[in-house]
Amino acid sequence: MMNLSHWRLLVAVADLRNISRAAQQVGLSQSGASQAIAQIEASLGAPLFVRERREVLLTALGEQVLQHARGMLVELDAIRALGDAALGLHAGRIRLATFPSVLATVLPGLVSAFRRRHPGIDVVALEGSDEEVEAWLAEDTIELGVVLNPAPQRQAVIIGRDAWMALLPAQHPLGRRSSEQGVSWSDLADQPFVLATGGCNVHAHSLATQAGVMLNDIRVTVRDLASAAVLVREGLGVSVIPESALPSDQRGLRVMQLQPPTYREFGLVCSKAGRDSAAVQAFLREL
């Protein structure tokens, strides 16, 4: 079944000629975007895109469908503008705080899409650690905060889920295994380790501890997940980072599945001010 996000994705892919960048713009994972495009093409019974080596191009049918999709989205945005005016959403501000990895990956697409539909509402994104986000929510300093692995009673709107992946130098002995076989925390326990926190309390060290394993040779600790990949590529050690934070250029690196697989979820949680905000509730409804 095709939905609005499918059509926004189609337009983004056509404009950017790249599925990964288009997925980020509309707030989808790359795998989710690929599946959505496959669903559209299956529904229409013909391909809309040709996958070239460096870019994705429209077919003749894709060009025709794109014209209608653009027109549909323009009309829908006009209807939304009428609704915004009726609901008093023609102006406002949402303060949204998150930890760095989500600010750099999932959030830009969601915020950009909302701003296009509601240009009168300003979304201010703030970066903080997960502890800072929790404090800002409690103090009503922000309307929305991204929380890692939120408890069910918090009624979070889940905006992402990804796997924790082991990152090794390309020639590392553990990398000779198949991707399906993966590596365990026990395999990593005595390896020189690059610990990337991502501004969160949930990271490789805490995950290993939960698995009953100690990381015995942490060589360096960094906040930035991208920095960890650079240090691993330089041979300073191995690391474990979320799949969404993996670099697009993986030359010199070997990415392995953790065994058993370990996942994280992140969701949007309202402060009291957020629950009372019409703009915030509109933002959440459209995710």
Image: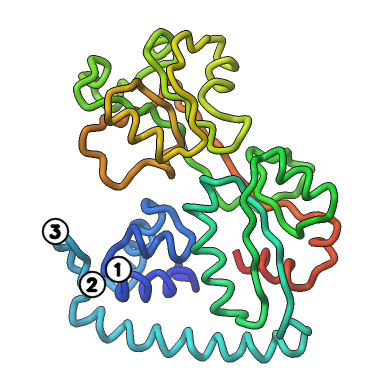
Please indicate whether residue 65 sits to the left or right of residue 91 in the image. Answer: left
Report, in whole angstroms, how far the alpha carbon at label 3 lies from the one at label 1: 20 Å
Please indicate whether residue 102 sits to the left or right of residue 191 in the image. Answer: right
Q: Residues within 10 Å of mark 3 (few under 14, many from 20)?
A: few
Asked whether the beta carbons under mark 3 and mark 2 sit within 8 Å of each other, the answer is no
Q: Secondary structure at mark 2?
A: loop
Q: Quadrant of residue 284?
A: bottom right
Q: Residues within 10 Å of mark 2 (few under 14, many from 20)?
A: few
Report, in whole angstroms, how far the alpha carbon at label 1 lies from the one at label 2: 5 Å
Which of the two labelled residues, at mark 1 and mark 2, occupies the earlier sequence position? 1
Please indicate whether residue 205 sits to the left or right of residue 231 in the image. Answer: right
The one nearer the camera, 122 or 70, is 122
Residue 135 numbered tag: none
Instruction: Check disc 3 and give the amino acid type.
Output: Arg
Asked whether the beta carbons under mark 1 and mark 2 sit within 8 Å of each other, the answer is yes
Residue 53 numbered tag: 3
Which of the two labelled residues, at mark 3 and mark 1, occupies the earlier sequence position? 1
Q: Is residue 97 above or below residue 226?
A: below
Instruction: Check disc 1 and give the amino acid type.
Output: Glu
x then y, percent, for residue 64: 27, 86
- Residue for badge 2: 46
- Residue for badge 1: 41
